[in-house]
Image (tube, rainbow, N blue to C red):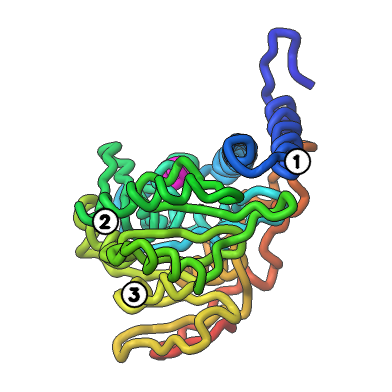
Amino acid sequence: MPREDGHDPTGTVAWHRAQTELRGAHDELAAALPGIACQAAYTRLLVAQRRCTALVHRWLAEALHLERVVDPRAVLSLDVDGVLEDEAAGFSSTGVIGAAALRLLQLGRVAVLLNTGRSLAAVRDRVQQFALPGGVGSFGASMWDDIFLHRSSLVSDRGKEQLRAFRSLLRTEPGLVQDPSHEESIRVSQVVDGELLPIAGPEARALLDRHGFTDLTFWVAPKHTDFVDRRADKSTGLVRLREELALNSLPLAAMGDGTCDVATLRTASRAFVPAAALPSYVPTRSQTLVRSRFLGEQALWDGARRLVPDAPLQRRVRATLEGIVFPEWFPPSQRRTPPQAHFRLPSMRRSRLSTPS
């Protein structure tokens, strides 16, 4: 319980407030008429979700002792959605397994750079929550350098023009809502019976073609569609960020689960792919590919223990996990820890194409 002075040492009060706001926003969105009211409810929902995410991530960062890598020996480009995070708790966040993987990578001096379709504001939040050096947002259209606290837009002048015009056009469409945090891209959803749905591929293509937005392309996700400058991509954004952080001379590993990650995976010396993702991906001649047997953050843990095959460091992370005492508010879905078998060292057999032990 909070003290009488209002201090909330366990985060219980903040969590219950955020959950109340989340439920209220869902109810408001379900009841809202198309137009301004619908957009207001959607924006309220996004704010509540981000508040929940921040509370979980900050608690995990403190519990797992996440800290900045000072003298990295390698770099990992890491996708967020479906790899580091999921929405099992009604908002997007990683769990104990994902945080444990980040801790192991930090102990092993692997600098993790986020590389995602999320907005730069969301990237900056996660980079600072997890003590990472930086990240790429909006499918390569923006980047955040947390060493010098510097943001960059990688959108072409023509792309900026068309994004601005297309954003205005979409505002006139009833039933569509936009995520206002996306500045270098447009994230839009349809609201149908209170549920968020994407603009389907054929419809998205028809919209761009009908209005002559030839410099934009799109990516479709389960709940939204992202429209981006077609000149931007995750690989190019990563190259720029590595140069800015002076990490371009270090070995590169990459992990992703979607078509938008393929270009980045191809530039890495070690590529990590979760189970059932990118089945047609073929490694380059000089590349080691690991296809995990696991999904999401468990696949990330699998990749982390391969990048840091150090028994004492893995035992150190395990000891930290064994000492965790969860506050009552912490979501049960995010409490899972890696099974003991996951702490075994991976096979060191060298192969261009490797599979999990």
Q: In the rendered view, does 95 fall on the left or right side of 251?
A: right
Identify the main secondary structure in magenta: helix
Can you say whether 157 is above or below 309 in the image? above
Among numbered discs 1 and 2, the one appearing first in the sequence? 1
Q: Which mark, by number, is residue 263?
A: 3
Residue type indicated by callout 1:
Ala
Magenta-highlighted residues: 122-127
> Amino acid under label 2?
Gly
The Cα–Cα distance between marks 2 and 3, rounded to whole angstroms, is 20 Å
Q: Quadrant of the N terminus?
A: top right
Q: Position of residue 27 (x, y in %)?
A: 76, 39
**Residue name at image x 55 percent, y 42 percent:** 61
Residue indicated by mark 1:
31
Q: Secondary structure at mark 2?
A: helix
How crowded is the residue under tag 3: few (<14 C-alpha within 10 Å), some, or many (20+)? few
Q: Quadrant of the C terminus?
A: bottom right
Residue under numbered circle 2 = 159
Image coordinates of residue 189 in percent, x first then y, are: 57, 54
- Examine the rendered structure and indicate whether residue 228 appears above or below residue 245: below
Q: Earlier in the sequence, mark 2 or mark 3?
A: 2
Percent coordinates x, y for residue 321 in the rendering: 66, 51
Q: Residues within 10 Å of mark 2 (few under 14, many from 20)?
A: many
Lateral position of residue 311 relative to residue 8, left or right: left
